[in-house]
Amino acid sequence: MADAAVTVVVADDEAHAVDYLRTVLHLEGFVVVGEASDASGAIDAVSHLHPDVVILDLHMPGGGMDAARMIASMSPGTRVLIHSATADEAEALALLQEGIHGYVLKGTAPDRLAEAVRAAARGDRYLVPEVGRVAVDALAERLRAEHHEELLDERRRNRITGLLRERPFATVFQPIVELATRRPMALDALSRASDGPTRGVEQWLDEAASVGMRESLEIALAAAALQHLDRLPAGLRMGVRVSPATAAAGRLHEVLVGRAPRVIIELTDPSSVDDLGALRRALAPWRDEGALVAVDDRGAGYVGLRHVLELEPDIIRIDAAIVRNVQADERRQAMARVLAGYAEDVGAISVAEGIEHEVEATTLAELGVRGGQGFHLGRPRPLDEQEALLAGPEVVALVARAR
């Protein structure tokens, strides 16, 4: 295309910039067929004049970016050349992806500006070196970051794979007792790291989740706990913790086959569940086999009425935030009484967490709370140190309720 045939619309809200562009373009043999000082004016000029090239000020009123997109969609024969005061990395990359044909800086030398207009008119891309370096540097940085993240993911996968192979974790057990009689109702299995205090099981689980391996690690932790099940007195259940995602994925069969009647499935963080109906359906076969279901909010507050109504847990936990100093707080007493009453009405079992003082235990029992758990009633310890339980005392047998 000859230079004389190239028509141009100039759009910039700074008069001196327009004067410079008009002068350079005229001297280089281009034809300026229109001018505009804002985005809407540029769009109107292009729609009426259909120039070969439009030079857009990126930061003019109304937004050069939006004008570029509109012009590209309504007048594909017009090439867009961006005119900007700075070589902005984000702008340059975003506009390249939008399909612009050039990016030049204000004050660009006449020969370089003419070269950019000619390239745009031919349908070629043109970036002034300053912007080209920005784009190249940004791409290199992005690739470095992606490579770094890939290396980190590989290390995380290797670390979790090592955990699954070597199993450097132990299980401790905390009793859940009937508050009225102090007879044991269940043992809650809690996993502990054995590779030092700076790396706990929750950190393992978070890292495993980042590389799609949380389910495998949760199943391994549950298996480590359930290998002790046969050592418990007859009728005493063991609670094992899994996330709703692991339960819904159908992998519970790896640890529950033949054990369901003696297990409580403790669902951690049920508030993260989007489809409670799907989770309930996934749990149904194990509940039919005799497993009980509890929800564990891990101190994040009570899980909410919706979760209780839809999941119908067999064990409704009363959070430690309600239990703490309950004997001296009428509001906490009222909440505990309501939750305990609801559990009794629907055939579930209320269990209060975080009981640290006798007065809390007796108050909760008077309010109708069935079970309790906390340091006052028994600290988490290895099974070998639970002599009283292993001696086979009378236990409270928890049975699945009819549905």
Image: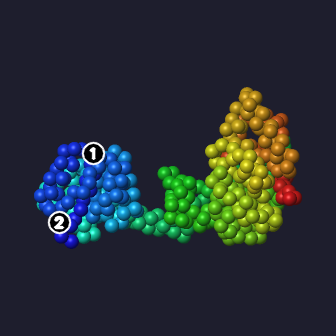
Say few, some or many: other residues with alpha carbon within 10 Å of mark 1 (under 14 / 14 to 19 / 20 or more): some
- 171 or 4, nearer to the observer: 4
Q: Say which mark, if any, is on residue 4.
A: 2
Q: Secondary structure at mark 2?
A: helix
Q: Earlier in the sequence, mark 2 or mark 1?
A: 2
Residue flagged by tag 1: what amino acid is it? Asp
Q: Is residue 236 above or below residue 289?
A: above
Q: Is residue 378 visible?
A: no
Give the image quarter of residue 165.
Answer: bottom right
Q: How far across and down, in percent of the image, does residue 227 sit?
A: 69, 66
Q: How far across and down, in percent of the image, does residue 118 sit?
A: 20, 66
Left or right, 295 with respect to 147, comes to: right
User: How far apart are the alpha carbons under marks 2 and 1?
Assistant: 26 Å
- 293 or 7, nearer to the observer: 7
Left or right, 335 with respect to 59, comes to: right
Query: Which residue is drawn at the image coordinates 36% and 58% (left, top)?
Result: 47
- 127 or 380, nearer to the observer: 127
Query: Which residue is drawn at the image coordinates 68% and 68% (left, top)?
Result: 250
Q: Is residue 369 above or below residue 308?
A: above
Residue flagged by tag 2: what amino acid is it? Ala
* Quadrant of the image containing the C terminus: bottom right
Give the image quarter of residue 43.
Answer: bottom left
Q: Which residue is mark 1?
A: 13
Query: Which residue is drawn at the image coordinates 69% and 35% (left, top)?
Result: 324
Q: Is residue 74 visible?
A: yes
Say few, some or many: other residues with alpha carbon within 10 Å of mark 2 (under 14 / 14 to 19 / 20 or more): few
